[in-house]
């Protein structure tokens, strides 16, 4: 090794950017195997922004001159154009075999544009480790902001529809069987509540996501003192990941993102499943607009809820992706490892699938066709009002609820045996029941068991009476407003960071 000549630096090849320790270039097949370059196109814009900020910090620290900063920025602009070209025609062969990720590719364009003496300074004070973690946090942040907007939109639809349908009688289900009288508006509020918690989880998580790793180096920082807090402000972060090793090793924000998205898509899946069941025989209480349905290639009568079935399936896909996000870091010691490389693909897939599912539900939910007469019809069948009758007997006659439950259960059994609705049952079928009904002031079962009348009586806190639904809707409106303002402020802060960077560069360039 002592007699080995120093290899000339070829800045046209990514393999020579950081392979001084190695005597040969990499095997092309190995490069292709370990490369993440195609997937890294997703983080390219973030990486360009990170390099912009880092170059500015090097200038501020006196390492770059104003002219050198301008040359590096020109190289980054060239890199942006080349990467956009690559996205349209992938892969350029010379790129695929010479670069294992986006970072040396961008650096190579800077060196080509400004020369090694200037462009070769760009990587001082950072590593691919802190750089890629910053890129990923920026991309996840951008996607989370979009998901929050879509979730806010869905919450708005649910709240508006709940208010509109607060008197639409509807059968609530347990064990997939009709259970109690409710309203379609009350059902929609249940989804509003669940997705409000999804958005709250996302909101609670955001401050932990929006922290800057840049400046952590490979794991133990750098001798170069750069202003990490200024970098955070320029990139729209709320602060920094303080410990340099944690900044490049920690993948818990991958897990938090995945867990929140899993919860969100499970809630979407549940609503999609409800709509699938209720749009199919024998329910037929709701119906998809034709433009959101599909048909069969063989059976002319079919109207299939394919988009809802896809939404239902996405939660299972995200569960699989989450398993990858959780299991990979669980077996690794502290530090960066190449095993982490594929995690960002699973993370981005989680984000993409969630965003797509939300978008579909935002299209479908407000345009569902409601068959209100069928809802009322099913609410009058199957003894759905049996609990109302049992509660009324126990409340007005001081009969023990267990006894009232037994007698009404007997009446339901007899009604089904005779093939009639509960409201048309003969109280004489159950010994002692006529006297109890008279004592309770129930002179006509059909009148008492009218679903619309029973809905008005379900006034328990959080229940489905129109007045209670109205109260919950009014309570939900300021919550929705608070969420909207919170997320709009976060979007503004990200944009403001970019403006701060541009102003800082202009100021330092003018000196």
Image (spheres, rainbow, N blue to C red):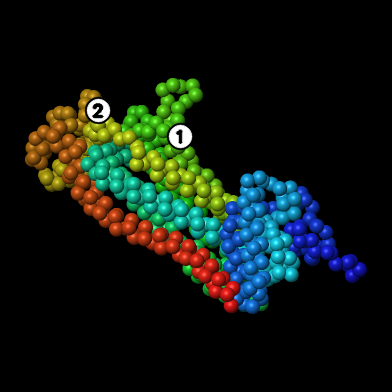
> Which residue matches tag 2?
416
Q: Left or right: where does residue 422 sit relative to residue 509?
A: left
Q: Residue at x 64, y 63 (%)?
A: 74
- Residue 174: image tag: none
Please state which of residues 41 and 121 is positioned toward the viewer in this rendering. Answer: 121
Q: Residue at x 11, y 33 (%)?
A: 444
Q: Residue furthest right?
A: 3
Quarter of the image with the C terminus is: bottom right
Any part of residue 126 in sight:
no
Q: Quadrant of residue 123?
A: bottom right
Please state which of residues 25 and 41 is positioned toward the viewer in this rendering. Answer: 41
Please state which of residues 368 and 178 is positioned toward the viewer in this rendering. Answer: 368
Marks 1/2: CA–CA distance: 36 Å
Any part of residue 48 in sight:
yes
**Secondary-structure class at tag 1:** helix
Q: Left or right: where does residue 146 sit relative to residue 101?
A: left
Number of labelled discs? 2
Q: Find residue 91 and report its horizontal and vertical position in percent.
A: 69, 46
Q: Find residue 429 and report its horizontal and vertical position in percent.
A: 16, 29
Work out whether 144 lies above or below 178: below
Q: Residue at x 15, y 28 (%)?
A: 426
Q: In which quarter of the image is residue 169?
A: top left
Q: Tag 1: Cα neighbours inside 10 Å, few (<14), some, or many (≥20)?
A: some
Q: Residue at x 59, y 73 (%)?
A: 509
Please state which of residues 396 and 34 is positioned toward the viewer in this rendering. Answer: 34
Q: Tag 2: Cα neighbours inside 10 Å, few (<14), some, or many (≥20)?
A: some
Q: Find residue 388 and report its horizontal and vertical position in percent.
A: 20, 41
**Secondary-structure class at tag 2:** helix
> Which residue matches tag 1?
306
């Amino acid at each position: 090794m002592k007699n080995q000549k120093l290899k000339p630096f070829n800045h046209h090849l990514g393999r020579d950017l950081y392979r001084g320790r190695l005597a040969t270039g990499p095997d092309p097949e190995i490069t292709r195997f370990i490369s993440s370059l195609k997937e890294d196109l997703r983080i390219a814009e973030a990486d360009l922004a990170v390099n912009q900020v880092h170059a500015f910090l090097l200038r501020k620290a006196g390492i770059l001159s104003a002219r050198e900063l301008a040359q590096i920025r020109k190289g980054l602009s060239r890199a942006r154009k080349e990467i956009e070209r690559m996205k349209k025609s992938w892969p350029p062969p010379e790129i695929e075999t010479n670069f294992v990720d986006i970072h040396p590719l961008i650096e190579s364009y800077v060196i080509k544009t400004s020369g090694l003496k200037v462009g070769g300074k760009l990587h001082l004070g950072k590593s691919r480790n802190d750089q890629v973690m910053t890129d990923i946090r920026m991309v996840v942040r951008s996607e989370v902001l979009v998901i929050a907007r879509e979730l806010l939109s869905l919450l708005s639809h649910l709240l508006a529809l709940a208010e509109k349908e607060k008197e639409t009688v509807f059968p609530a289900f347990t064990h997939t069987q009709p259970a109690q009288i409710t309203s379609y508006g009350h059902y929609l509020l249940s989804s509003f509540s669940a997705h409000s918690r999804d958005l709250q989880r996302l909101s609670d998580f955001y401050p932990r996501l929006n922290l800057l790793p840049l400046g952590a180096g490979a794991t133990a920082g750098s001798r170069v003192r750069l202003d990490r807090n200024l970098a955070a402000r320029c990139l729209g972060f709320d602060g920094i990941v303080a410990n340099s090793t944690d900044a490049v090793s920690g993948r818990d924000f991958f897990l938090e993102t995945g867990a929140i998205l899993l919860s969100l898509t499970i809630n979407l899946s549940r609503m999609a499943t409800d709509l699938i069941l209720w749009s199919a025989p024998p329910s037929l209480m709701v119906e998809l607009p034709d433009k959101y349905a599909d048909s069969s290639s063989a059976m002319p009568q079919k109207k299939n809820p394919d988009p809802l079935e896809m939404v239902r399936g996405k939660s299972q896909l995200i569960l699989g992706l989450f398993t990858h996000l959780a299991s990979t870091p669980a077996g690794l010691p502290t530090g960066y490892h190449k095993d982490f490389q594929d995690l960002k693909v699973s993370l981005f897939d989680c984000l993409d699938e969630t965003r797509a599912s939300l978008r579909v539900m935002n299209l479908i939910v407000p345009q569902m066709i409601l068959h209100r007469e069928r809802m009322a019809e099913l609410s009058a069948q199957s003894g759905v009002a049996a609990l109302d009758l049992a509660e009324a007997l126990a409340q007005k006659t001081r009969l023990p609820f267990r006894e009232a439950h037994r007698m009404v259960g007997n009446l339901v059994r007899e009604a089904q045996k005779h093939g009639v609705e509960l409201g048309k049952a003969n109280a004489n079928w159950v010994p002692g029941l006529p006297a109890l009904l008279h004592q309770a002031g129930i002179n006509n079962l059909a009148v008492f068991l009218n679903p619309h009348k029973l809905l008005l009586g379900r006034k328990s806190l959080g229940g489905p009476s129109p007045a209670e639904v109205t109260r919950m809707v009014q309570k939900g409106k300021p919550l929705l407003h608070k969420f909207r303002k919170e997320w709009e402020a976060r979007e503004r802060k990200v944009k403001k960071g970019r403006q701060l960077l541009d102003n800082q560069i202009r100021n330092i360039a003018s000196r």
